[in-house]
Image (cartoon, rainbow, N blue to C red):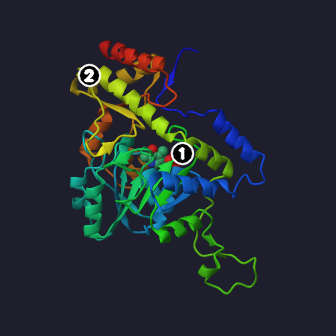
Amino acid sequence: MEKFIPYGKQLIDEDDINAVIEVLKSDFITQGKKVPEFERKLADYCGAKYAVVFNSGTSALHGTYFALGLTEGDEFITTPMTFAATSNAGLYLGAKPIFVDVESDTGNIDVEKIENHITPNTKLISVVHYAGHPVYMKKIKHIADKYNLKVVEDACHALGGMYKGEKIGNCRFSDATVFSFHPVKHITTGEGGAVLTNDKEVYEKLLMFRNHGITKDKDKFINQPDGDWYYEMQFLGYNYRMTDIQAALGISQLKKLDSFIEKRRNIAATYNEAFKDNPYFETPVEKDYAYHAYHLYPIRLKDEYKEKKQEIFSKFREEGIGVQVHYIPVYWHPYYKNLGYEKGITPVAEDFYQREISLPIYPAMKDEDIEFVINKVWKVFKSV
Ligand SMILES: *Cc1c(COP(=O)(O)O)cnc(C)c1O
């Protein structure tokens, strides 16, 4: 098979494999000690008090919205420039996503447009650090305080990134931050996710939510226990647990996170240099408050090339470059359309979508792979 470079993939080494094998040979492959160890290390890395890991980023979002009280009839503000999970998780709870338009350069929610969409039913704001570039969180927090709203950071693109010199995930300007450990994300556990928070009550709710709504803490029992075996289910939760096999992989991957981010940033710097002043597309921006985690390297086609996106996309694929598009505005999907969302509600996001193509960026890329991509970029654009 000819060379094919995907837009993203995991980097697993011998240490990772050995960490998993060790758990497989131990007594506990789930509900053992590796899960709390991973949680402690994640919380410490990000500078938050608590972490709760889940079996996916999506279930982590579901748990977060639940723990923050999002329920039937509530509205929550979010971005259409994301994977569907960010808004789907609110639909699971019977809440209504309100899509607010994005900034044309970062692709992040446009903070200036949020207030117009707040109603008496608004419960929370869920922002996405698109491609790994942090949202201007201080302004989000300011609006949230003014209207008494909760704030969630969907940081599935941004583990290892920083906002104003502090790690994403410390929750200084939010109630909770969510990560995903899918293989294209910054570290992987196969499938997996996590919630970080500084709020003890939210933390305890999350622990119960991922385990059927059950508690074994006798200080929390509603009924009188009738024996030492007693436990209580207090609300309808799920089995959203991560295994110890996965947590062991996560612990091992976390040790390499900083080097992964450095590699991603180096690739972005190489692309930025190679593509500066090119006539075809804009390269990603990094604002002064941002330390970009570069989950993606999203280019934005200039006007003359916007109409040729399909041709450009298919030529990249023919040349062995696994470009992707992030994202189709969430409410364009048939399911959302059937809920009553109409095209045109976030014009900047729609325009962003029509221009956007993600070039490959992942830590396992070799110098020759980066060179290969750059050469193909020139080849494809010169031919359209
Ligand atoms: C990957 C991703 C998710 C969902 O994570 P899974 O682990 O795949 O469930 C949610 N939001 C964003 C922005 C993502 O990129």
In the rendered image of this protein, does residue 77 appear above or below residue 349? below
Q: Which residue is drawn at 60% across and 43% down?
A: 252
At label 2, counting other C-alpha atoms closer than 10 Å, the crowd grade (few under 14, some 14-19, many 20 or more) is some
| Image coordinates for residue 5, horizontal then vertical, percent | 49, 23
The amino acid beneath tag 2 is Tyr
Q: Which residue is drawn at 36% across and 13% down?
A: 379
Instruction: Name the residue tied to disc 2.
Output: 280
Image quadrant in which the N terminus is located? top right
| Image coordinates for residue 212, horizontal then vertical, percent | 62, 66
Q: Quadrant of residue 32?
A: bottom right
Q: Quadrant of residue 319?
A: top left
User: Which callout, 2 or 1, points to the residue nearer the camera?
Assistant: 1
Mark 2–mark 1 Cα distance, whole angstroms, equals 33 Å
* Foreground of the two, 369 or 354: 369
Q: In this view, does 311 lie to the left or right of 288?
A: right
The amino acid beneath tag 1 is Phe
Image quadrant in which the C terminus is located? top left
Mark 1 CB in 8 Å range of ligand 1?
A: yes
Q: Residue furthest bottom?
A: 224
| Mark 1, secondary structure of its residue | loop
Instruction: Name the residue tied to disc 1.
Output: 181
Q: Residue at x 62, y 33 (%)?
A: 13
| Image coordinates for residue 152, horizontal then vertical, percent | 39, 58
| Image coordinates for residue 81, horizontal then vertical, percent | 35, 44
